Image (cartoon, helix red, strand yellow):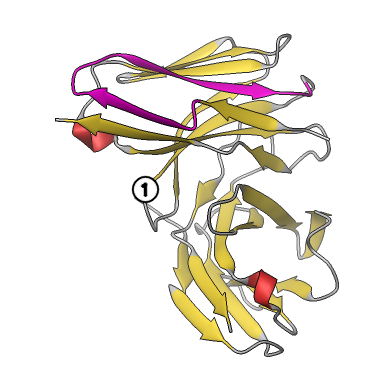
Amino acid sequence: EPEVTQTPSHQVTQMGQEVILRCVPISNHLYFYWYRQILGQKVEFLVSFYNNEISEKSEIFDDQFSVERPDGSNFTLKIRSTKLEDSAMYFCASSVLAGYQETQYFGPGTRLLVL
Amino acid sequence: KQEVTQIPAALSVPEGENLVLNCSFTDSAIYNLQWFRQDPGKGLTSLLLIQSSQREQTSGRLNASLDKSSGRSTLYIAASQPGDSATYLCAVRGSGGYQKVTFGTGTKLQVIP
């Protein structure tokens, strides 16, 4: 069964460094998403992406964050200058469409630790 | 702003018991509601999705209901098994963003053999 994959599974970085988290969505999906989950807290929506542009973003997704689909398969989340509070599990998701009956399929996540 | 709450936060039951997990949301203008399962250190697995026009969905031993007007959903698990042990999350879509999904805090379920 097709699945969303994410790399790396774990990343440790120093505060102020840039990180890029990578995702490969399911191949026929058109909508892509990033979520994060700070340890012990709720899963939070960051951004959705369609047709090579951001279609929706939350208040968390500030200028430090950016997303890109550099080729036909990868979907990336970049954090320009990481802060301690960026430490979280980051989930990528994809869906075929964005209709009300569409299920979002989630990847296994990347655990980011900022020191 | 949509708020999603799940009760109880944790639940421990003996194997074979039927159980109900609850989810409530503050804004009834939703597109759909989805139940997920999260295993420790893992991603989210979609269990059931209920469209806003539907009242319930069933998959195997799982049955999810939706009462949009009262802002509630329940996930019923029949004949629980130790493999059902996980955190169950409910998430609503819409209201504050067409594609934005708002998650609840989750119910951590432990099924004791």
Mark 1: few/some/many CA within 10 Å (<14, 14-19, 20+): some
Residue B53 on image: x %, y %: 67, 13
In this picture, is A15 found above or below B21?
below
- Residue at image position (29%, 15%) is B78
- Residue at image position (57%, 54%) is A93
Q: Quadrant of residue B37?
A: top left
Q: Is residue B113 left or right of residue A104?
A: left
Q: How many marks?
A: 1
Residue A54 on image: x %, y %: 80, 60
Of B24 and A108, nearer the camera is B24
Q: Which residue, given by chain and number where applicable, does mark 1 sit on?
A: B39
Label 1 lies in what chain? B
Of B107 and A79, nearer the camera is B107
In this picture, is A53 found above or below B106?
below
In the rendered structure, does residue B12 fall within the stretch colored magenta? Answer: yes
- Residue at image position (71%, 78%) is A83
Under mark 1, the amino acid is: Asp
In the rendered structure, does residue B108 fall within the stretch colored magenta? Answer: no
Look at the image and tell me in which quarter the N terminus of chain B lies. top right
User: Residue lying furthest left in this view?
Assistant: B113
- Residue at image position (51%, 83%) is A12
Residue span colored magenta: B8-27
Q: Is residue A21 left or right of residue B86?
A: right
Secondary structure beneath label 1: loop
Of A26 and B76, nearer the camera is B76
Q: Is residue A9 visible?
A: yes
Residue A11 on image: x %, y %: 49, 80
Q: Label the magenta part by its dominant secondary structure.
A: strand
Q: Quadrant of residue B73?
A: top right
Q: Quadrant of residue A10?
A: bottom left
